[in-house]
């Protein structure tokens, strides 16, 4: 059975159910394959490690057993490195294919997970702030800061979590294409919810929720830099 078999008819992929009346989708997207591979799985660092290891082993083998042995040792090490890179690429492709980010005028929904998918439902009124980190290819990361009482396990989120924020995990839209345009949609949506919250304080009780088979500086977006 597929995950869609458990959802009401008409539910869009990546959402926990049909949209309520009056709610509209502003944007839907997924991480770029290259962004997940290079910045979440650190493929460049992995290949650099295998290349350095192959070089050191080759130098040692040359001194003790000659050039032929050195080529064999280096070639074997590099081949293992290529296999590791292939595995990382496949995992990055799975992340790219199984992830759906959905922004509506009321919430941000992160549908993540390969084997055991979960759906993280974040009301915009519960997002304290959002940041933007741009990269040279136009993609970017958008971490979302939740109130102190709202917590989602870091391991449940990864790689859709801001790096190294383990004690207070921040859900993150990882390597979304055309991130500046996404930020331009998110900022006014957050601001609008913050304005509505000021008029209706009772809305603060709507929590972030997580669903899945495995189980206000609001409105301010600031670019953290480009690489």
Image: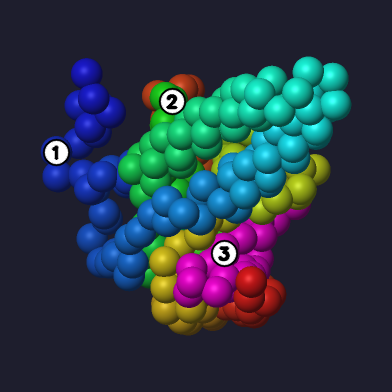
> On the image, numbered disc 2 is attached to which residue?
116
- Secondary structure of the residue carrying tag 1 is loop
> On the image, numbered disc 3 is attached to which residue?
142
Q: Which residue shows up at 76% across the image and 23% down it?
A: 66
**Viewer-nearest residue: 15 or 81:** 81
Q: Please give left or right for residue 118 compared with residue 47 in the image.
A: left
Check the image and tell me how it is coloured.
rainbow
**How far across and down, in percent of the image, does residue 69 sit?**
69, 20
Please provide the residue range marked out in magenta. 127-152
Q: Nearer the viewer, mark 1 or mark 3?
A: 3
**How far across and down, in percent of the image, does residue 23 sit?**
29, 64
Q: Quadrant of residue 127?
A: bottom right
User: Within the magenta stretch, is there residue 145?
Assistant: yes
**How far across and down, in percent of the image, does residue 132 sit?**
60, 72
> On the image, numbered disc 1 is attached to which residue?
9
Q: Residues within 10 Å of mark 2 (few under 14, many from 20)?
A: few
Q: Which residue shows up at 33% across the image and 61% down it?
A: 28
Q: CA distance from mark 1 to mark 3?
A: 31 Å
Q: Earlier in the sequence, mark 2 or mark 3?
A: 2
Q: CA distance from mark 2 to mark 1?
A: 21 Å
Q: Which residue shows up at 76% across the image and 48% down it?
A: 164
Figure label count: 3
Q: Which residue shows up at 39% across the image and 54% down it?
A: 30
Q: Please give left or right for residue 176 compared with residue 169 in the image.
A: left
Label 1–label 3 contact, CB within 8 A: no
């Amino acid at each position: 059975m597929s995950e869609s078999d458990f959802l009401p008819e008409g539910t869009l992929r990546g959402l926990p159910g049909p949209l309520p009346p009056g709610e509209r989708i502003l944007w839907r997207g997924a991480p770029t394959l290259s962004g997940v591979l290079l910045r979440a799985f650190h493929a460049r660092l992995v290949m650099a490690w295998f290349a350095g290891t192959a070089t050191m082993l080759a130098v040692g083998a040359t001194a003790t057993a000659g050039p032929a042995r050195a080529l064999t040792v280096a070639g074997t090490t590099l081949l293992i490195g290529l296999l590791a890179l292939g595995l990382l690429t496949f995992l990055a492709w799975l992340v790219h294919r199984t992830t759906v980010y959905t922004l509506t005028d009321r919430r941000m929904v992160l549908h993540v997970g390969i084997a055991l998918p979960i759906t993280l439902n974040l009301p915009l009124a519960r997002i304290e702030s959002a940041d933007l980190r741009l990269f040279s290819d136009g993609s970017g990361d958008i971490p979302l800061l939740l109130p102190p009482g709202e917590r989602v396990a870091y391991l449940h989120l990864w790689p859709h979590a801001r790096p190294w924020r383990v004690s207070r995990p921040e859900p993150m839209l990882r390597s979304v294409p055309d991130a500046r345009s996404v930020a331009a949609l998110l900022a006014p949506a957050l601001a609008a919810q913050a304005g509505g919250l000021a008029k209706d304080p009772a809305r603060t009780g709507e929590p972030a929720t997580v669903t899945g088979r495995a189980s206000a500086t609001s409105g301010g977006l600031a670019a953290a830099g480009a690489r």
